[in-house]
């Protein structure tokens, strides 16, 4: 296992920057978590949104099971790091852990004894948490915590940048689709761009559907129900 020193951090930063999308960034982060954090057997990402917590990326099914236990019980190291804003949550042995009395027995039943969770955040927003898991108790030493904290800091910046890029691309795609739909309506009804947009808005409100979805359907099929 390579040590995450200055050269390793530089290489990691370059590899994250080279990824073209958010999926690639998350995959690279989880791969680095398993190779750079001593003792890590499994890795996953907890993401926060207005809908709650979820796991957008995981190395395997076991991570999803353990995370679902946390989300369903409302407690656990991932949530402590992500939602409670604890920078690092260290779990040496879940069999002697008193912080999460409901979650811990469930995780133990699936063979997990040790965990590390690192809060992912930038100066503007809390993204979630980077989590690693091990079957052995006391699997993580001080070097593991240090490497994980460095990895989490670089990962948060890369994830935030990739998310911004994804949002920008989605916005551009929506604008293009709506523009195509407006063009169809302008030709069909001999209306101005503003009037065509108003027709889309009216159809969206009447059908209780998103404007972009209606525009995409119109562009694909030529059908639009306004009344």
Image (cartoon, rainbow, N blue to C red):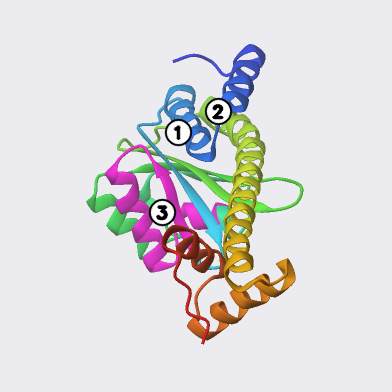
Q: Nearer the viewer, mark 3 or mark 1?
A: 1
Where is residue 117 drawn, in percent x and y? 51, 44
Quarter of the image that includes the N terminus:
top left
Going from the N terminus, do you reach mark 1 or mark 2 first? 2
Q: Image point 35% across, 32% down: which residue?
A: 41
| Residue receiving disc 2 | 19
Q: Toward the viewer: 108 or 197?
A: 197
Splitting the image into 4 quarters, where does residue 93 fall?
Answer: top left
Q: Is residue 128 left or right of residue 73?
A: right
| Residue receiving disc 1 | 27
Where is residue 209 drawn, in percent x and y? 50, 75
Count neighbours of disc 2 (C-alpha within 10 A) and say few if under 14, some if 14 to 19, many if 20 or more: some
Question: Relative to residue 144, is residue 106 depicted above or below?
Answer: below
Residue at the right extreme, as displayed = 123
Going from the N terminus, do you reach mark 3 or mark 2 first? 2
Cβ–Cβ under 8 Å for marks 3 and 1? no
Splitting the image into 4 quarters, where does residue 120 fall?
Answer: top right
Secondary structure beneath label 2 = loop
Count neighbours of disc 3 (C-alpha within 10 A) and say few if under 14, some if 14 to 19, many if 20 or more: few
**Residue 95 in sight from this viewpoint:** no
Question: Relative to residue 84, is residue 43 depicted above or below?
Answer: above
How far apart in space, not on screen, are marks 1 and 2 (Cα)? 10 Å
| Residue receiving disc 3 | 97
**Residue 190 in sight from this viewpoint:** yes
Where is residue 141 drawn, in percent x and y? 49, 29
Q: Toward the viewer: 188 or 42?
A: 188
Q: Is residue 119 left or right of residue 217?
A: right
Query: Which region shows up in magenta?
Result: 52-81
């Amino acid at each position: 296992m390579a040590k995450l020193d200055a050269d390793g951090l530089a290489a990691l930063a370059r590899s994250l920057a080279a990824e073209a999308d958010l999926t690639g960034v998350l995959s690279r982060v989880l791969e680095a978590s398993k190779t750079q954090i001593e003792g890590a057997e499994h890795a996953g990402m907890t993401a926060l949104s207005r809908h709650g917590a979820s796991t957008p990326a995981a190395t395997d099914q076991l991570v999803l099971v353990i995370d679902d236990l946390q989300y369903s019980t409302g407690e656990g190291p991932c949530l402590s790091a992500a939602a409670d804003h604890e920078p690092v949550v260290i779990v040496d042995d879940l069999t002697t852990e008193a912080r999460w009395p409901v979650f811990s027995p469930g995780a133990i039943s699936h063979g997990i004894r040790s965990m590390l969770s690192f809060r992912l955040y930038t100066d503007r927003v809390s993204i979630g948490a980077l989590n690693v898991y091990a079957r052995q108790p006391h699997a993580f030493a001080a070097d593991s915590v240090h490497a994980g904290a460095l990895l989490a800091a670089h990962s948060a910046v890369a994830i935030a940048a990739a998310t911004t890029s994804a949002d920008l691309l989605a916005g551009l795609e929506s604008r293009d689709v709506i523009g195509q739909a407006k063009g169809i309506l302008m030709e069909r009804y001999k209306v101005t761009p503003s009037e065509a947009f108003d027709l889309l808005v009216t159809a969206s409100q009447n059908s209780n559907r998103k404007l972009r979805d209606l525009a995409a359907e119109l562009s694909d099929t030529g059908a639009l129900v306004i009344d």
